[in-house]
Every structure is written in structure tokens, then in C-alpha cells.
Image (spheres, rainbow, N blue to C red):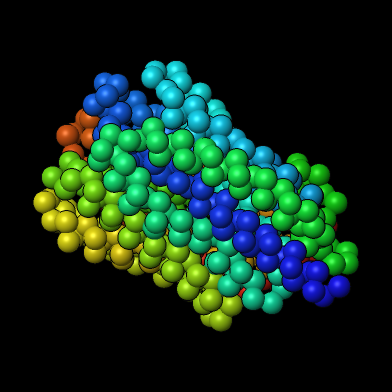
Amino acid sequence: MTRFKLDARWAIVAVGFVALSLAFSGRSMLSLAMAEWTTEFGWTKAAISSVMTVTLVAMAGLAPLVGYAIDRSGPRVILTAGLVLVGASSAVLAGMHSMLAFIIGFALLGALGFGLVANHAVSSAVARSFDVGQGRAIGIATSGSTAGLFVLMPLLGLLLASGGWRLGYQALAGACVLMALVAWWLLRNAGAATALRGPAEGAQESFVARVGYLLRRPTFHGLFWSYTLCGYTSTGVVETHLIPFAQFCGIPPAPSALAFGILMGVNAVGMVAAGFLTDRMNRTVLLASIYFFRSLTFLMLPLLIDQTAVLWIFAFLFGMFDYATVPPTASLAASHLGKARVGTAMGLLSGGHAIGAAIGAFAGGYIFDATGGYTWLWSSSFGLALAAAMIAGLVPARARAIPATA
């Protein structure tokens, strides 16, 4: 019996790792292809960023429902369906020739797929499955959101340099469909692995009751608002606009793509390290420190003009403090808000993250079109990351017992 539990739990970690790698590749390819699309189709950066904004808003609305589904039935259906939708999105984008096809492929199919195959879905499923070494397991599983990009993004950058962005989307579509079949088989026992042992407070709550409970907890608000600002300064700003900014500064596509690959590779290391530290130190201090050091990295970006080395150094340093917020945030949510509610809690947090990211993605395109540069974008990112550090520092280090009727 013990052997079965271990196998089922680590299957969730493995499938989550690969699924996140593919889904985040689909999201990140937009930043690589943006310059190609503005040339080939005549689209403005603001128009492309607006579609990304709509996608992130849709993901935000979907996130709490996905988290609740993880709480109730586990990750099998969610992750498998998400992979199929990401594959369908990639297939549509591979053949698109109009803005309408882009909207259908990215803002409709992509939003659904990215919303299902997301860090909050994987992290909450893992958090429910592990008691010992929870932070480490979360860090390993969610590092897939960046680890795969360490290999994929430089390869896609080379394809883009030769005008092959369609081939990149075709390859991604095939990989997603294949992984969906593998996930359906490997996760056949995932429901049992994520089921809570014994009675758990809140396990039978309706979605509305569960959301109401969370909204009354100060800890939830500390995690939510810091994670919302996290979305602005990571997914919204850096993942969407770093490569266009580098190219604006005179750095060619291939070195820019390599920088993104460095960022994602280091990001994976940072997530695993954060997961290791989550199990061993004050999680509030850890989370606040990650946001603080992230804010300092934005001070480097005004120095980027024609300086490829500066871009690579920024990618390395930012990567250490980018998605490293996920393990301590998920662990704090599980311990302070309850394992029975961690999926819904992480879904709401992810919704806030997506809203912040949507604002950041739109702000980058709008600021560039309005001012001809990115200076105000980086200044706002520095200030908001610093604010996130202060908010995260207010989260209690230890969970307090709360009456079931609270």
C-alpha cells in the first residue's frame, strides 16, 4: 500500500513537470514571435499585448474553478484536458494568417489550456499529496514551468531567426497531444493520491462557502495581493516584454532567446532551491526576501543598450527570484488555510497573479507605443516588487488554529 502511494504521488510530480513545460512554452513563444508578427502581419505590439491581456484575464476567471476541481477530484482530467487544449491552440496558431485566428487560437483555446495546465493546479495537487518534503516536491513539479524552456526557447529562437515560427507551433501541438495520452494513463490513481486521510475541515464546503471562508482570512489577503504584484513583475512584464525590449536595445533575436533560456533554466533551479528552503526555514522571511531581491534586479535594465552581457546577467539574477515564489506561497496556503482548501486558495491566488500579469502585459505595449520606450515599465516593476515584499512580510510565520465555524 505504501509503495502505491509513493508511485501515485510522484506520478503527479512527473506529469506536472512535463505538462507545465509544454504549456509555458506555448505562452512564452508569443514574446519570441512578436517581432516576426509585427513585420509579417503588420500588427502593433499593443494589439498583440491586448490579446495576451484578454488571455490572462480569462485564465484568472478560470483559476479558482480549476483549483476547486483539484480539491474535489484530483488532477487527472484537468491536466489531460489542458494539454489537449494547448495542443489545439498551437495547431491553430501554426496555420494562422489573420488576427481572428490569433484570437481564437490564443485567447480562446490557449486561455482554456493555460488555465488548466497551470502552476496552481500542479502545486495544489502536490501539496495535497505530500506531508513530508512538501516544499521540495512542489518545487520540483512546478519547476517544469521553466525548466523545459531552458532547452525549448533557444531552439525556437533559432527557428524564428530562419523564419520558422510556424514549425515551432506545429512541434508543440504534437508534443501536447502525445503527453495528454501519457498523462491520462499515469494519473489513473491520482485521485486516491490527493485524497485527504481522515476528516478534514472544509472538505465538504461548496465553492461559494469555500471562497467566502478564504476571503475572511487575513493570511489569504497577504498571499493574494503579493502574488498579484508578482504576476505584474514576472509574467506580465518580463516574460512578455523582455525579448522585445532587448531587440529594441539592439540585441539580435538569437542572443535574446538565449537570455530567455538562461532565465528559465536558472528559474527552475530557483524553484527547486526555494522548495528545499521552504521545508527548512521561516517561509514568510523566505517569500518576502524573494520579492525584495527581485525588485533590485530591475535596476539593471536601463543599462541594457547594446549590452548583451548585461541582458544575460539580468536573466540569471531575475531567474533566481522569479517563480521561486511558488513553493513558499503554496506551502503557506496549505498550512494556514487548510489542505482541503489549498486548490481553491491557489486558484484564487493564481487568478490574482493572472490579473497582475494582464495589467503588466498591457502596460508594456501601451507604454512603448505612448513613450517610445520601456523606462516607466521597469520603474513601476521595481516599486511593485518592493511592495510585494512588504505585503508578504505581514503573513504570519505559523498557522493559527481557526474554529470550524469561522
* Residue 58 position in % (x across, y down): 55, 33
Residue 206 quadrant: top right
Whether residue 174 is visible to the viewer of this picture, yes or no, is yes
> Could you tell me which quadrant the C terminus lies in?
bottom right
**Residue under the point 50% across and 52% down:** 21
> In the displayed structure, would residue 370 be above or below residue 249?
above
Q: Nearer the viewer, residue 380 or 84?
A: 84
Name the foreground residue: 273 vs 160.
160
- Residue 302 x %, y %: 17, 53
Q: Residue furthest right?
A: 198
Residue at screen point 60% across, 40% down: 177
Q: Tell me, yes or no, if residue 362 can be seen here.
A: no
Q: Quadrant of residue 15?
A: bottom right
- 340 to 106, vertically: above or below: below
Residue shown at 39% from the left, 58% from the top: 150
Residue 137 is left or right of residue 368, and the answer is: right
Residue most toward the bottom? 280
Residue at (35, 45) in percent of width and height? 156
- Image spot of residue 319 (x, y percent): 36, 62
Name of the residue lying farthest toward the left: 306
Count of picture labels? 0
Q: Is residue 51 or residue 398 the one in the foreground?
A: 51
Looking at the rendering, in which quadrant would you find the N terminus?
A: bottom right
Image coordinates of residue 249 in percent, x first then y, are: 15, 45
